[in-house]
Image: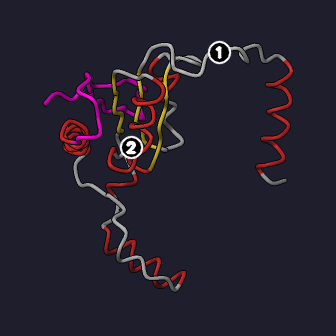
Amino acid sequence: MPASTELEAANQRYAATFDKGTLPLPPSRKVAVVACMDARLDPAKALGLSEGDAHVIRNAGGRTIDALRSVVISQQLLGTREIVIVHHTDCGMLTFSDEQLRAKVRKDLGEDVDHISFLPFGDVKQSVLDDIQVLKKSPLVLDVPISGYIYDVASGKIERVDN
């Protein structure tokens, strides 16, 4: 059975008791979370967030340069005034270089992706610090509190990363 069939059935059960259809569009806690897409990380659960509390923007590695478009929309149109960055231990972004992935795509798909940076990193703590700086230096991002964390996939705990 494909995963989509299971997901559709799960949604039927979810929708049967859904009672949050009147939540306002802007997030109530005025926070945007930029986090990795890793399946072992559930940012809402890890940070104690409920539906309607925050925008959760996810991508490979939780890279802020990749999330910039969404951060601008979140701030300018929906009023968020704080940003939280969450990277994690044992991240797949630690396992490759741009050139390795570009070579794999060329070999497997016959496509040239030399123009794409996949944004891998060699140090999780440094990646959080780098991503904080990307946002702080961007003229498109408001001067708001920005904090960074490393989520431990083994324990579920977050550790703050300070500049």
Query: How busy is the neighbourhood of tag 2: few (under 14 within 10 Å), some, or many (20 plus)?
Result: many
Query: Is residue 163 shown left or right of residue 15?
Result: left
Q: Is residue 9 above or below residue 16?
A: below
Residues shaded magenta? 138-163
Residue under numbered circle 1? 23
The one nearer the camera, 37 or 73, is: 73
What is the three-letter code of the residue carrying label 1?
Leu
Specify whether 74 is left or right of 100: right
Q: Amino acid at mark 2?
A: Gly
Separation (CA) of disc 1 from disc 2: 26 Å
Q: Is residue 39 above or below residue 46?
A: below
Q: Nearer the viewer, residue 47 or 133?
A: 133
Residue 140 drawn at (x, y percent):
29, 40
The local secondary structure at tag 1 comes to: loop
- Position of residue 121 relative to residue 136, above or below, is below
Q: Is residue 11 left or right of residue 48?
A: right
Give me the residue at 85% from left, 53% from top: 1
Q: Going from the N terminus, do you reach mark 1 or mark 2 first?
A: 1
Image quarter for residue 18? top right
Image mark count = 2
Q: Is residue 140 magenta?
A: yes
Residue 150: image quadrant is top left
Front residue (pair 91, 126): 126
Residue at disc 2, secondary structure: helix
Where, quadrant-wise, is the C terminus in this rendering? top left
Q: Which residue is mark 2?
A: 62
Residue 22 lies, in percent from the top left, at 71, 14
Identify whether 69 is placed above or below 1.
above
Of labels 1 and 2, the one closer to you: 1
Name the dominant secondary structure of the magenta segment.
loop
Q: Residue at x 73, y 18 (%)?
A: 21
In percent of the image, x 25 and y 42: which residue is there?
131
